[in-house]
Image: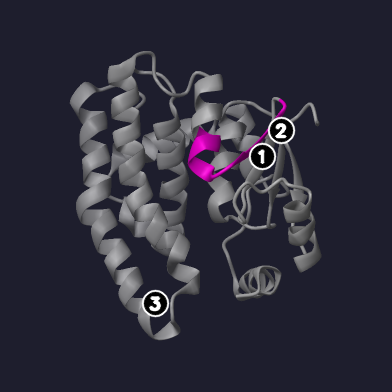
């Protein structure tokens, strides 16, 4: 078992990208094995690495963890990013679920039928600008602290900033009226390990394009 966490996934964002973000923000170096062919995926299945027939899979601390939420939960707890008590953990979980509402819409956008994409983008922009970003801006304004919970970095901050990057790829103007969220983005982005993650050639993956999507279709045979 590798000393560093070993991530098994496609060479794309998908459901592994929040895990990459979390590990980077925690200052954890990791390695990746990319699934490039149907044979790579079958090998994982045949080796017994997939408890369920799907990825991501992360080898860490003598375990092979599957399902993105348990992987995120484990690493957040291990690196003190999940709150100091039950109240903080509840708030962090609540904010993460809000982030997930928008993130899921963005994640599924590339596989949407072409005729539906414009309507889906409009919906994402509306919900983001009129519901979710105002809610998070209000949280930061209400306590005047640098982070969402307990005035220290948590998983909620990391996943929110990841979402902000996605939102800006859709429409940079959506952040215009949210100075506290822009400041949070700058604060997280300037963490040395996150800065390294974000720089060209870093571990952050580019947006899903048709080439990446076609490769995933062939590997998963859908």
Whether 69 is among the magenta residues is: yes
Q: Which numbered mark, 1 or 3, is in the foreground of this view?
A: 1
Dot 1 or dot 3: first in sequence order is 1
Q: How is the image coloured?
A: one colour
Tags 2 and 3 in contact by the CB under 8 Å rule?
no
Residue linked to disc 2 = 5
The residue stretch that appears in magenta: 62-72
Residue 202, horizontal then vertical, whole percent: 70, 45
Is the N terminus in the top left, top right, bottom left or bottom right quadrant? Answer: top right
Residues packed near mark 1 inside 10 Å, few (<14), some (14 to 19) or many (20 plus):
many
Give residue 191's quadrant in the image. Answer: top right
Residue 68, horizontal then vertical, whole percent: 53, 44
Residue 6, horizontal then vertical, whole percent: 73, 38
Work out how far the residue at label 2 is from the one at label 3, CA to CA, in angstroms: 36 Å
One can see residue 9 in this view: yes
Tags 2 and 1 in contact by the CB under 8 Å rule?
yes
Describe the element under mark 2 as helix, strand or loop.
loop
Residue at point 45%, 31% (across, down): 155
Dot 2 or dot 3: first in sequence order is 2
Tags 1 and 3 in contact by the CB under 8 Å rule?
no
* Residue 58's disc number: 1
Work out how far the residue at label 1 is from the one at label 3, CA to CA, in angstroms: 32 Å
Dot 2 or dot 1: first in sequence order is 2
Residue at point 58%, 26% (across, down): 26
Residue linked to disc 3 = 117
State whether residue 171 is above or below residue 93. below
């Amino acid at each position: 078992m590798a000393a560093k966490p070993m991530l098994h996934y496609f060479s794309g964002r998908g459901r592994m990208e929040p895990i990459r973000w979390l590990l980077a923000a925690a200052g954890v170096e990791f390695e990746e094995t990319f699934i490039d062919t149907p044979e790579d995926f079958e090998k994982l299945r045949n080796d017994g690495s997939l408890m369920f027939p799907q990825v991501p899979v992360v080898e860490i601390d003598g375990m092979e963890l599957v399902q993105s939420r348990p992987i995120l939960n484990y690493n957040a707890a291990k690196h003190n990013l999940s709150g100091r008590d039950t109240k903080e953990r509840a708030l962090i979980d609540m904010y993460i679920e809000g982030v997930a509402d928008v993130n899921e819409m963005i994640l599924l956008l590339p596989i949407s039928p072409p005729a539906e994409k414009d309507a889906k983008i409009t919906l994402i922009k509306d919900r983001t600008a009129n519901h979710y970003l105002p809610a998070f801006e209000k949280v930061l304004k209400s306590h005047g602290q640098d982070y969402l919970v307990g005035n220290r970095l948590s998983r909620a901050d990391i996943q929110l900033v990841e979402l902000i990057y996605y939102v800006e790829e859709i429409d940079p103007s959506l952040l215009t009226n949210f100075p506290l969220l822009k400041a949070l983005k700058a604060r997280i982005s300037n963490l040395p390990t996150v800065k390294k993650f974000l720089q060209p050639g870093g571990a952050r993956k580019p947006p899903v394009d048709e080439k990446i999507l076609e490769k995933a279709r062939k590997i998963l045979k859908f």
